[in-house]
Image: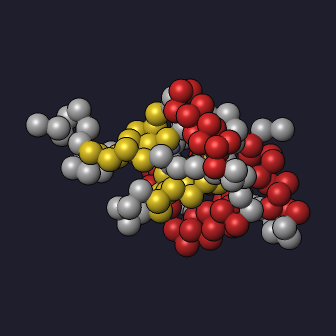
Amino acid sequence: MDWVSHAQAELRGAGYRPGAAARLVLEHLDREDCCRGAQEIFDALSTGGTKVGLASVYRMLERLDERGLVQRIDLGDGIVRYEAARDAGHHHHLVCGACGKVEPFADRRLERAIEAVEERSGYSVVAHDVVLRGACANCRD
Ligand SMILES: [Zn+2]
Ligand SMILES: [Zn+2]
Ligand SMILES: [Zn+2]
């Protein structure tokens, strides 16, 4: 089952009735390769000619977060971002403190190193975040 259908089924199971607006937010998140903030999603949907209220976008993201359907990403800049929670496409983030750009990166060796830490620690780890902060190639000098 694709992520959009899965998320809609989960929302229905939780007693919500995901309508057209919910579907648009889900489809938008599904298309994006990385995290987006509520305002950013709202702007993108509005530009595409869709009438979805900003409050609805916020509410929708909160519901998805409650059900573990999105990953909530806090990069420390005051904007809460979300991305579709899927096993495929697991990645981390590079953040430019100068222009605010957020870029995804994935690294198998980093994942293996984190798994090794989990084994040594004796913890049952359910999630991890890695954020690299600094200045992007355009902003660095
Ligand atoms: Zn991301
Ligand atoms: Zn930058
Ligand atoms: Zn990872």
Please count the marks in the image.
0
Which quarter of the picture shows residue 9? bottom right
Q: Residue furthest top?
A: 108
29 vs 65: above or below: above
Residue 124 x/y as whole percent: 72, 52
Of 103 and 54, the residue lying toward us? 103
Q: Is residue 89 left or right of residue 101?
A: right
Q: Residue furthest right?
A: 13
Residue at image point 35% right, 61% down: 77
Q: How is the image coloured?
A: secondary structure
Residue 48 x/y as whole percent: 50, 47
Q: Report whether residue 5 is seen.
A: yes
Residue at image point 64% right, 43% down: 120
Q: Is residue 23 left or right of residue 116?
A: right
Residue at image point 41% right, 56% down: 75
Residue at image point 26% right, 51% down: 97
Which quarter of the picture shows residue 50? bottom right
Q: Is residue 90 left or right of residue 36?
A: right
Q: Quadrant of the C terminus?
A: top left
Of 116 and 7, the residue lying toward us? 116
Which quarter of the picture shows residue 43? bottom left
Q: Report whether residue 60 is seen.
A: no
Residue 89 x/y as whole percent: 61, 34
Of 3 and 85, the residue lying toward us? 85
Q: Quadrant of the N terminus?
A: top right
